Amino acid sequence: QVTLVESGGGLVQPGESLRLSCAAPRAIFSVFAPLDMSWYRQAPGKQRELVASISSNKRIEYVDSVRDRFTISRDNSRKIIRLQMNNLRPEDTAVYFCNAKRGGDEYWGQGTQVTVFS
């Protein structure tokens, strides 16, 4: 079920930065604060992997490969999350997906492409 809206992907060189945003449309999400939010990514030929998560109580976790380079944040009043990606590497190239969970319900975005080329 695709209901979240990602933006901010693009084509960059190694060492550059991008900021991804994920919006939860108000028409679909009447409440946002209780959602556990995450960013996943999927590179060609690889499984989708969890990159970063921020829970409803703002507990944050990162996959080791992006720790100290990526920062996840949320703005509950605007119903958005962001992923600030610094010092990008070619291995960060993937489609990045936003994910929301609450109880047994799960929601995804359509994905945004991030390409880091040498």
Image: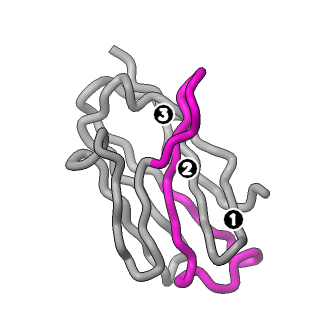
Q: How many marks?
A: 3
62 lies left or right of 1: left
Q: Position of residue 52 (x, y in %)?
A: 41, 55
Tell me the CA gap for discs 2 and 3: 10 Å
Region in magenta? 21-50
Q: Which mark is residue 7?
A: 2
Question: Which of the 4 quarters of the picture holds residue 48?
Answer: top right
Residue 25 inside the magenta-drawn segment: yes
Question: Which of the two discs, 2 and 3, sits closer to the camera?
Answer: 3
Q: Which mark is residue 114?
A: 3
The secondary structure that most of the magenta stretch takes on is loop
- Amino acid carrying mark 3 in the image: Val
Question: Which of the two discs, 2 and 1, sits closer to the camera?
Answer: 1
65 lies left or right of 79: left
Residue 45 lies, with reference to residue 41, above or below; the image says: above
Q: Nearer the viewer, residue 65 or 31?
A: 65
Quarter occupied by the C terminus: top left
